[in-house]
Image: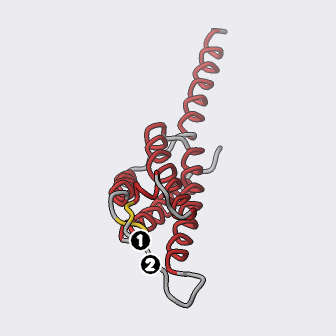
């Protein structure tokens, strides 16, 4: 009879451990499809023109102005690689990291579009290409999705 309370305590501890483990995980649900489509859009944008007719891969690996190049790295890392890792591991901390990376990427993306439109003279700049605009829109979509997903964590008990 003295073993029964020990068994119940062990069972209670095991249930609490499972609850704590489950609280650290995310379930993106249908949002995972949107995240995957946005990541695919970023990859497709790399073969489209970004700045002065240069495709995104040239901007990423070749000679380009500094800000679109920074955005290209932010889009690939924060918009493709980190979401893939986060969807595979499904941890809350990585969801917040993806949200912050998407925020930084969206800021640098909007600034990249702005810098392609401005010059030091009175003539307008070459303007952004379709690939740059597509990548910025995809990163902003990722920002919204990751913020909603990361902020939806239920309170810890």
Label of residue 52 in the image = 1
- The correct choice, above or below, for 65 with respect to 3 in the image is below
Which residue is more in the foreground, 5 or 95? 95
- The C terminus: image quadrant: top right
Task: Indicate the position of residue 1 as horizontal and vertical percent values.
Answer: 63, 9
Q: How many marks?
A: 2
Query: Which numbered circle lies on residue 126?
Result: 2
Among the 4 quarters of the image, the one containing residue 45 = bottom left
Q: Nearer the viewer, residue 71 or 34?
A: 71
- Residue at the spot 50% in from the left edge and 80% down from the top edge: 117
The quarter of the displayed image where residue 42 is located = bottom left
Between residue 122 and residue 86, name the one nearer to us: 122
C-alpha separation, residue under disc 2 versus residue under disc 1: 6 Å
Element class at badge 2: loop
Specify few, some or many for label 2: CA neighbours under 10 Å numbering under 14, 14-19, or 20 or more.
some
Q: Using residue 60 as the reference point, say whether residue 46 is left or right of it.
A: left
- Mark 2 and 1 residues: CB-CB less than 8 Å, in contact? yes
Residue at image coords 39%, 51%: 32
Rate crowding at label 1 as few (under 14), some (14 to 19) or many (20 or more) other CA atoms within 10 Å. few
Residue 132 x, y percent position in the rendering: 42, 67
Which residue corresponds to the image point at 58% horizontal and 67% vertical from the top-left?
107
| Image spot of residue 49 (x, y percent) | 36, 66
Query: Residue 62: x, y in percent?
Result: 46, 54
In this rendering, is residue 96 above or below 2? below
């Amino acid at each position: 009879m003295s073993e029964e309370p020990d068994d119940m305590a062990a069972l209670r501890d095991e249930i609490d451990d499972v609850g704590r483990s489950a609280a650290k995980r995310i379930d993106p649900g249908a949002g995972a499809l949107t995240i995957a489509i946005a990541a695919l859009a970023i990859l497709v944008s790399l073969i489209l023109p970004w700045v002065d007719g240069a495709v995104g891969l040239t901007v990423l690996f070749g000679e380009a102005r500094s800000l679109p190049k920074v955005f290209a790295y932010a889009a690939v890392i924060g918009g493709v690689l980190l979401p893939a890792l986060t969807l595979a591991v499904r941890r809350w901390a990585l969801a917040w990291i993806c949200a912050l990376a998407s925020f930084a990427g969206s800021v640098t993306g909007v600034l990249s579009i702005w810098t392609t439109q401005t010059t030091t003279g009175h003539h307008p700049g070459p303007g952004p290409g379709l690939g740059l605009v597509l990548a910025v829109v995809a990163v902003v979509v990722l920002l919204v999705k990751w913020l909603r997903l990361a902020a939806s964590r239920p309170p810890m008990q």
